[in-house]
Amino acid sequence: MNFIPVNTPLLDGNEEKYLLECIRTGWISSEGPFIKQFEEKFAAYIGRKEGIAVANGSGALDIAVQALKIGPGDEVIMPAFTIISPAQSVVRAGAKPVLVDSDPESWNMDVTQIESRITPKSKAILVVHIYGLPVDMDPVLELCKKYGLYLIEDAAEMHGQTYNGKKCGSFGDISTFSFYPNKHITTGEGGMLMVDDHELAERCRKLRNLAFESGGRRFIHHELGWNYRMTNMQAALGLAQLEKIDKHIIKKREIGNAYQKGLKDLIGFQFPLGKTEYAENIYWVFGLVADSAELCESTIGKLNAAGVGTRPFFWCMHEQPVFKNMGFFINEKYPESEKIARNGFYLPSGLGLLDGDISVVIDAFKDSTGYL
Ligand SMILES: *Cc1c(COP(=O)(O)O)cnc(C)c1O
């Protein structure tokens, strides 16, 4: 039996050609011509002045938090339901994540709950666009302005998505992307920070490179940085992928729409919204939220037995053992986020999905759940 994995990347363009060029020219480290090209082209695509390519999307968030000088005594407002990356960046910087529950329909941060979480210690709002639909940005932008807060935008799942016609990744003082192989475009591992302010961009570049000073005696440091440099080989992949990004987005939406249509009679599951007032779903993944945790678990088991890979949804930040052990989020409850985390899972939705795979997945549902 063939197994359909949750993700397979699509490397059918100039990836091989550009990678070979790295090897033939010897440019394999973070020096090399593709990095700057990839930064400039992706920044132009998103509509930002500068892009700073890094080793991964989590590292981009580490740099974002440090570049904005967020540290001990500061609070950062963010969703309870997210991958751990943004929360760990804030905690590592010595600041405190302040959580907001999810909107039960879009699965994004419920922006109507943000203002009540703002305190004199608040320094930034960190939005994370989840699974294919953007956060409702207008109210967030208003709050940032009203209270003088930075906006960090984790757009790791949103390459090419728009909010009211404006690209995701164009909203934050710093916005970040990931190019992990399950994202809309990949560099294997990789990420990028998006910035308009030149000084801030230079600061991000410095932090990416061990906080080397641009002038003065080399190897004398005034601040700790990271080695989060992207290699020319990663950028080679990125450039080739970027040439195809519009096709990738179309394919992702086709996959999402095919599942919406093929599974529409399924009972006992909540579907992703196809669209909101401000965006059409880009279906980074195609997720379902079961009516109960038991149904979620049994469905994952049955699909797996039928050769269909799945992944459970993210787990809430306030329920992470690592953060609880550090004394964060004691007795906090975010009921909508908890429900999504416990009952949600996603289906194979990678760009390398073969034509017949979607019907195999749909049939596996029909045969195994008894809910159709
Ligand atoms: C994938 C992802 C990240 C992490 O990116 P890596 O490149 O894997 O470090 C961060 N935030 C979100 C929302 C993601 O989906």
Image (cartoon, grey):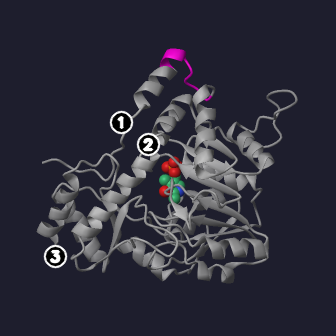
25 within the magenta span: yes
Q: Which residue is mark 1?
A: 12
Q: Are marks 3 and 1 in contact (CB under 8 Å)?
A: no
- Percent from the top left, x then y, of residue 107? 46, 73
Residue drawn at x 71%, y 37% as measured from the top left:
210
Task: Identify the amino acid type marked 3.
Answer: Leu
- Percent from the top left, x then y, of residue 267? 23, 80
Quote the CA–CA distance across marks 3 and 1. Answer: 36 Å
Residue 292's image quarter?
Answer: bottom left
Quote the CA–CA distance across marks 3 and 2. Answer: 37 Å
How many numbered marks are there? 3
Q: Are marks 1 and 2 in contact (CB under 8 Å)?
A: yes
Disc number for residue 244:
2
On screen, residue 235 versus residue 299, left or right, reads: right
Q: Looking at the image, which is closer to me, 73 or 104? A: 104
Q: Which residues are magenta?
A: 23-30
Q: Is residue 242 above or below residue 173?
A: above
Q: Is mark 1 within 8 Å of ligand 1?
A: no
Q: Looking at the image, which is closer to me, 146 or 79? A: 146
Q: Earlier in the sequence, mark 3 or mark 2?
A: 2
Quick one: label 1, few (<14), some, or many (20+) residues within 10 Å? few
Q: Is mark 2 within 8 Å of ligand 1?
A: no
